Structures are given as structure tokens and as C-alpha cells.
């Protein structure tokens, strides 16, 4: 497997867990750290949350779920 890590930093192995609210956390040496997507979700403005809800209503729940699960593989025409 090809690893493209920057050798300037030391990357430790992390374990991944999901809490009761669906937030993903990583831990190393017993210290829990939230995932980037968890941080982005928790800091999203109400305007952005409302826009996402409106988009899901516009394209439909099934299509929104399909696009959300494969965001890098799809061209989004919304």
C-alpha cells in the first residue's frame, strides 16, 4: 500500500470510535480527539444547517443520501 505521509511529522496509530450522538472520535494514548467532520458539524452556522436541510428537501432524501455517501465521485447539479 502506498503511503504519501509527510516524513516531517511523526504519525501515530489511532483508534476510531463513534459516540451516542454519531460524533466520530479518534484516540491515541488514551486522549480522545474529535474528527474534522465532527468539528465542522458542531461549528456550522444555523444558516448553513438550514441551507443543507433545504437542499435535502429539494433533491429528495434518497438522492441526498446517495450524493453524501459518494461526494468525490459525483457531479452535483443542484
Image (tube, rainbow, N blue to C red):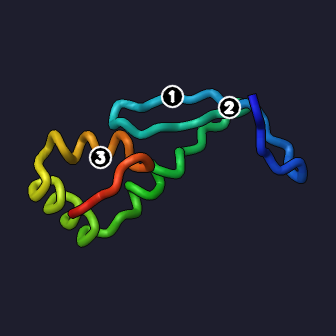
Q: Quadrant of residue 40?
A: bottom left
The residue under the point 16% across, 39% down is 62
* Location of residue 58 in the rendering, given as x and y in whole percent from the top left corner: 10, 58
The residue under the point 24% across, 62% down is 77
Residue that numbered label 3 is attached to = 67
* Location of residue 11 in the rendering, given as x and y in whole percent from the top left corner: 79, 40
| Location of residue 42 with respect to 3 vertically, above or below | below
| 10 Å crowding of disc 1: few (<14), some (14-19), many (20+) | some
Q: Nearer the viewer, mark 3 or mark 1?
A: 3
Quadrant in the picture for the N terminus: top right
Quadrant in the picture for the C terminus: bottom left
Residue that numbered label 2 is attached to = 14
Ranked by sequence position, the earlier of labels 3 and 2 is 2
Disc 3, SS = helix
Residue that numbered label 1 is attached to = 17
Q: Nearer the viewer, mark 3 or mark 2?
A: 3
* Location of residue 25 in the rendering, given as x and y in whole percent from the top left corner: 53, 37
Disc 1, SS = strand
The Cα–Cα distance between marks 3 and 2, rounded to whole angstroms, is 28 Å
Amino acid at each position: 500500500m502506498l503511503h504519501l505521509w509527510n516524513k516531517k511529522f511523526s504519525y501515530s496509530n489511532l483508534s476510531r470510535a463513534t459516540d451516542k450522538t454519531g460524533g466520530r472520535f479518534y484516540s491515541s494514548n488514551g486522549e480522545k480527539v474529535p474528527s474534522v467532520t465532527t468539528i465542522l458539524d458542531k461549528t456550522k452556522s444555523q444558516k448553513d444547517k438550514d441551507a443543507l436541510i433545504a437542499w435535502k428537501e429539494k433533491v429528495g432524501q434518497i438522492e441526498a443520501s446517495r450524493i453524501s455517501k459518494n461526494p468525490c465521485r459525483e457531479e452535483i447539479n443542484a
